[in-house]
Amino acid sequence: MTIDGLRVLVTGGCGFIGSHITQSLSNKGAQVIAFDNFSSGYRENLEGLSGDVRIIQGDIMDYRKLSRACKGLDVISHQAAQLEITKALADPITDLKVNTEGTLNVFRAAVENGIRKIIYASSAGVYGEARTLPQTEEHPTDPNWPYGVSKLAGEKYADIYSKYYGIEISCLRYGIVYGPREWYGRVLTLFLRRALEGKPPVLWGGDQIRDFIFVTDVVDFHNRLLEESDRAVGVFNVGSGQGTTIRNLAELVVETYHLEEPKYEDTGEGEMSKEVKGRKRLPLELKRMVLDNSKAKKLGWRPEVSLIEGIKKEYAWLQNNVHRWKELRY
């Protein structure tokens, strides 16, 4: 399958990851519809694109509008989701509806419109606490948050729709995707926002291990699945394959932006921070998460952006978009 001339709908196409996918596909000659309800997406994410991009304001919960938008298309890239962990904990029903029922609407719309290829944005959150590192796609799935449950349900429905209707569905279990246009609330964004003010990072613990993957590397793998469609069905980890402690992440930010040493705060899981106003430490926090990306690499993909390079790219974006990081979302 060649991307040039491909007709693609990207749900959440004006959001963080979705806008990068939309931009990349457009640059490669695809005809793209960005379908977004603007709960977290921004039209400005797609400003200046010269390719064939149409924006439709719509919600994946509105099946009729979604299905109409899918007429005559070749592929759906399903990136829209309820992403906030605290919201999922406070309101698991809404999380379930958006992430599971909304995903079912996408699959149904594909069947109704004869679309044979879907790329579904899942999450490493389906694994829960790591039993072995790195986590392969065969690692047990035991989510510790409702968000992981709703994403895993989407994967199970993907398997059913793939077998029953013959749709090629690729499920991408994202690591911690970061980069320009990321929403404000996750750990690196907190560190960078404070760095912009000349303040050191605040640590709650610091031994937690995460797998950070730059957004353009995610997009590169996404596009490879379109080009290698005959080998690109099933579940794929999309991570760097490298574990980074939150302490080391903080030290990188300190060294890069010449800050004082990280500040340690005795904040328990589920408690509000006194140093980072409005931010609560997440309950049921994962201790370790590192993804084995060898399956993705078999398709010829490699992460190209180092963590320090990616941090600098995100910080440069932040300097020109401080207005985007005023409201916490997590």
Image (tube, rainbow, N blue to C red):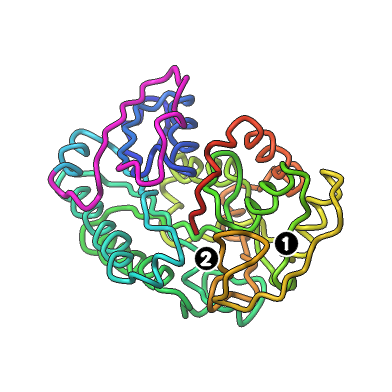
Q: How many marks?
A: 2
Q: Position of residue 160 (x, y in %)?
A: 26, 67
Within 10 angstroms of label 2, few (less than 14), some, or many (20 or more) residues? many
Q: Which mark is residue 141?
A: none
38 lies left or right of 49 = left
Identify the residue at horizontal 36%, vertical 50% (top origin). Answer: 80
Q: Position of residue 215 (x, y in %)?
A: 58, 44
Residues drawn in magenta: 37-64
- Element at badge 2? helix
| Residue named by callout 1 | 202
Identify the residue at horizontal 38%, vertical 54% (top origin). Answer: 120
- Element at badge 1? strand
Q: Position of residue 271 (x, y in %)?
A: 57, 75
Identify the residue at horizontal 50%, vertical 68% (top origin). Answer: 125
- For this orientation, the residue located farthest to the top is 50
Depicted 329 relative to depicted 308: above or below: below
| Residue named by callout 2 | 124
Q: Amino acid at mark 2?
A: Ala
Depicted 323 relative to depicted 326: above or below: above
Depicted 245 relative to depicted 167: above or below: below
